[in-house]
Amino acid sequence: MKLDILAFGAHPDDVELSCAGTLMVEKMHGKKIGVVDLTQGELGTRGSAELRKQEATAAAEILQLDVRENLELADGFFKNDEVHQRQIIRAIRKYQPEIILCNAPDDRHPDHGRSAQLLEDAVFLSGLRKIETIDNGQLQTVWRPSYVFNYIQDRYLHPNFVMDISAVMEQKLASIRAYATQFENPGLDEPQTYISTPDFLDSVIYRAKMYGKMIGVKYAEGFISRKMIGFNSFDAFIKENT
């Protein structure tokens, strides 16, 4: 299936926390959207790989994803090398997205920055016809997306642009809460972690409010682009409320 937008996350829940609203907005505009999780999040303090899989499936239904798959790379130990680049290339060529969303280039969790560099390198290599990859016994077509945007995660990074997600903020929060083992859940007998405190989810909401305030809307998600963004009409701009 060809997708318009494909979001990669180092772990199940990265996408929900960072760019789920944008995916849902584009779905409302008739786009085909998907998620590829690199790992099963098996090193997480709370829950298990199997529970994370169930949670990711529940979140996918909330987001109305057309596709979700997990590459089952080693959580914490995947590398930016040929073996892993080829796995990413196969996913890119399989879905042929016009736009890729991926982890922040710098973040508290080392997997996030490493994932961003892995994606950047694989996107370039995916466009080289002399690199051959096979999917279901068939030689894949060379493909390179038009844009790669990094979503912003835990650290404060200044976005190059933001997307208004006011209309879907509640669904975004519902997709995050689908990961019941990972976030605030008083009824769960698991160790407390950095992301399971009430303050963490509050910070996600506050960040969306801050980015929204920048453009005069209630909530927004921020993105970084290494490529210059152009417009063919000023009508694309959101007008701030004055």
Image (cartoon, helix red, strand yellow):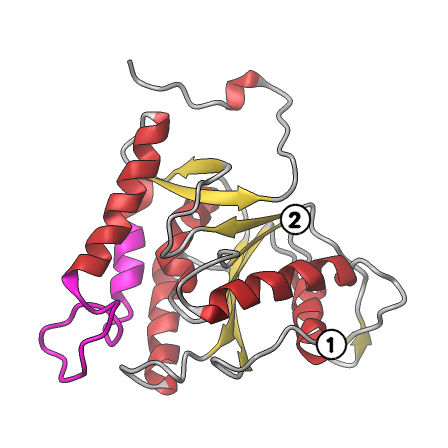
Can you say which quadrant of the picture contains the N terminus? Answer: bottom right
Segment colored magenta: 171-198
**Where residue 71 sits in the image (x, y, percent)?**
56, 77
Separation of marks 1 and 2 at Cα, in angstroms: 23 Å
The residue tagged with tag 1: helix, strand or loop? helix
The dominant secondary structure in magenta is loop
**Where residue 92 sits in the image (x, y, percent)?**
67, 63
Q: Viewed as shown, does residue 21 lie left or right of 202? A: right
The stretch drawn in magenta includes residue 137: no
Q: Viewed as shown, does residue 166 lie left or right of 70? A: left
Q: Is residue 170 above or below residue 238?
A: below
Please state which of the two labelled residues, at mark 1 or mark 2, is closer to the viewer: 1
Q: Viewed as shown, does residue 65 lie left or right of 2? A: left
**Where residue 199 sits in the image (x, y, percent)?**
17, 58
Asked if residue 170 can be seen in this view, the reply is: no
Label drawn at residue 82: 1
Name the residue at 52% across, 84% down: 74
Amino acid type at mark 1: Glu
Q: Earlier in the sequence, mark 1 or mark 2?
A: 1
Q: Foreground residue, 111 or 88?
A: 111
Tell me whether the residue at label 1 lies in contact with that at label 2, contact meaning CB atoms closer than 8 angstroms: no
Q: Residue furthest right?
A: 130
Name the residue at 41% across, 63% down: 14
Name the residue at 43% across, 43% down: 222
Amino acid type at mark 2: Glu
Q: Which residue is mark 2?
A: 98
The stretch drawn in magenta includes residue 175: yes
